[in-house]
Image (tube, rainbow, N blue to C red):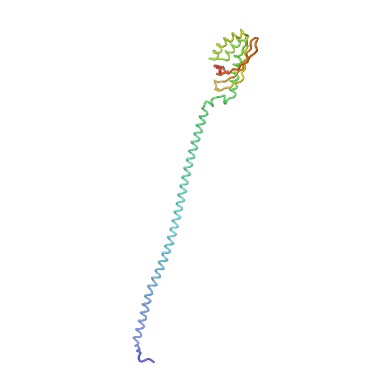
Amino acid sequence: MVSTGERVGTPDERVGNRDADVDDGGAAGADAAPENASDATGEADEADEAKGSDETGRTDDARGRDGAEGTDGATRSVHRRILAGAAVLLTVALLAAGAGLFVKARQLRDTPATDNLALTDSAATTRVIGDVSNALGTVFSYGPRETDATKESAKRYLDGKALQQYAALFGQVEKQAREQELTLTTHVVRAGVTRLTGTGAHLLVFLDQVYERRGRAATTAAAQLSVTAELRGGHWRIVDIAAR
């Protein structure tokens, strides 16, 4: 039953109303679609940004690793250069030290001390001491009837200035020895070579001399001489004598 106060639309109006509803729904759907599209676009943008951020992070990490590797390589290169420089300096220092030691050794070999055979040649030193000691013991020992033999001995053992000194001195001693029947005996107590070369020697000689006169007790006196000797004819001959 339909109320009389309510108007019933015609079929055409009802169709129109349905079309209007459909249009309104489509419009609403159309309005909703842009919003959904906008949301999808935003999500896509966020995804792209996240992906870009991840890629940027990985790129930055890679750059960081490359930078670190480059820094490490540069540090190792600096260390290698430092070590190489240190090695060069050490080599130069060793060469300089070796050269200094060579020069020092050469100087030591060339010093007068090393030229002194008395410090290095014991056989030559012993020989010169023996020859000089024998010469002094002979030329400074005589008796009242042995002066001629002593003078001849002096010619064999002395030379140069020493022979001249001895000849001048012995002339006076010879006269006293005959008149006072004086006997002199000389012993070399100690002799040392202060310098020795292949042809010359300097010695310090300590003597004990015993004087005996007729009718008197023997007396002993000590003497100290500086002697210079030269190697002549295979024998050491005294060329200078000085009392000390």
- Give residue 130's quadrant in the image: top right
Q: Where is residue 98 in the image (x, y as percent from the top left)?
A: 50, 35
Q: For the view shown, which residue lies furthest in the front direction? A: 216
Q: Position of residue 104 (x, y in %)?
A: 51, 31
Q: Dividing the image into 4 quarters, which one contains the N terminus? A: bottom left
| Front position in the image: 188 or 160 | 188
Count of numbered badges drawn on the protein: 0
Q: Where is residue 75 in the image (x, y as percent from the top left)?
A: 46, 49
Where 72 sits versus 172, above or below?
below
- Give residue 179's quadrant in the image: top right
Q: Dividing the image into 4 quarters, which one contains the C terminus? A: top right
Q: Where is residue 136 in the image (x, y as percent from the top left)?
A: 59, 16
| Front position in the image: 52 or 15 | 52
Q: In the visual, does 121 lie left or right of 53?
A: right
Where 243 sits versus 63, above or below?
above
